[in-house]
Image (cartoon, grey):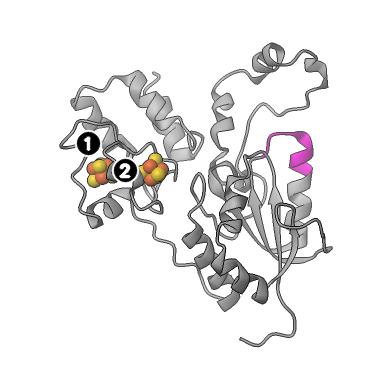
Amino acid sequence: MTRNHKPKLAVWKFASCDGCQLSLLDCEDELLEISAEVEIANFAEASRAVVNGPYDLSLVEGSITTPHDEQRIHKIRRWSKFLVPIGACATAGGIQALRNFADVQKFVSVVYAQPQYIATLNKSTPISDHVFVDFELQGCPINKLQLVELLSAFLAGRKPNVPRHSVCVECKTKGNVCVMVAGGEMCLGPVTHAGCGAICPSYNRGCYSCFGPQESPNTSSLSHWLGEHGREKRELVRAFREFNGWAEAFRRESESHEK
Ligand code: SF4
Ligand code: SF4
């Protein structure tokens, strides 16, 4: 592919653990080819060098949790031609969004000796709550092959081909015996976005949905089945309230079992 200039790639961090950025570094073999095709203009995990914007593609890790974050994401959006949140924090608020179901000021007063110095928002929210996003890559952390596909699609000027089906499809493709139907385990595979290759059921345990909701998840049907098989409401609340608990479909489902 001939270009007059290499597209500029920037990677940004908000409230997160850096795991999704590490997925990019973990690409190893592919990273050399990627770095030949793009100019890595801002990626603190890989280099101290910072090239000023505008940027052709911004990958954003982390959720918005402070007033400063709220301002910074708007600047990044203005600097970026394409902007893609990566990971559960950036696409759903992350595990830190568990505070959204409680009073954050109570946590601040208990955890910090000098709470008056803490500037925090009441909620941890995904990037799409603040700015327009061009695509989202789910997962905690993201799958590196899906990331490579995203970058390849960007370079080729096409839509990324990331499957939208559930973990159950991956699980059946591997020939696993269903841990939920056959073993009675709680498993969120039927409503979870594919990408991990059904790791947990392959090791005989249920999926806790670190990849978040699949497209159009039928959460109420899964809850109904689980309820009929002895699961209590408080178990359903906890199941839907993990790394992606603030994703709309999971939030609505968990709240429906609190009533
Ligand atoms: S074990 Fe879980 S992911 Fe696998 S088929 Fe059963 S419900 Fe689906
Ligand atoms: S929790 Fe679910 S989505 Fe996450 S690795 Fe396990 S099976 Fe995959």
Spatial separation of the CA atoms under disc 2 and disc 1: 9 Å
User: What's under tag 1, amino acid-wise?
Assistant: Met
Mark 1 lies on a secondary structure that is loop
User: What's under tag 2, amino acid-wise?
Assistant: Gly
Could you tell me if the residues under marks 2 and 1 are in contact, i.e. CB atoms within 8 Å? yes
Residue ID at (63%, 30%): 123
As drawn, is 204 to the left or to the right of 116? left
Query: What residue does disc 2 label?
Result: 189
Q: How would you classify the magenta stretch by its main secondary structure?
A: helix
- Where is residue 134? Give x, y as percent: 59, 60
Query: Does residue 66 show up magenta in the picture?
Result: yes
Q: Any atom of ligand 1 within 8 Å of the CB at mark 1?
A: yes
As drawn, is 171 to the left or to the right of 52? left
Query: What residue does disc 1 label?
Result: 180
Residue ID at (40%, 19%): 258
Q: Residues within 10 Å of mark 1 (few under 14, many from 20)?
A: some
As drawn, is 197 to the left or to the right of 224? right
- Where is residue 177? Give x, y as percent: 18, 45
Q: Any atom of ligand 1 within 8 Å of the CB at mark 2?
A: yes
Mark 2 lies on a secondary structure that is helix
Q: Which residues are magenta?
A: 64-71
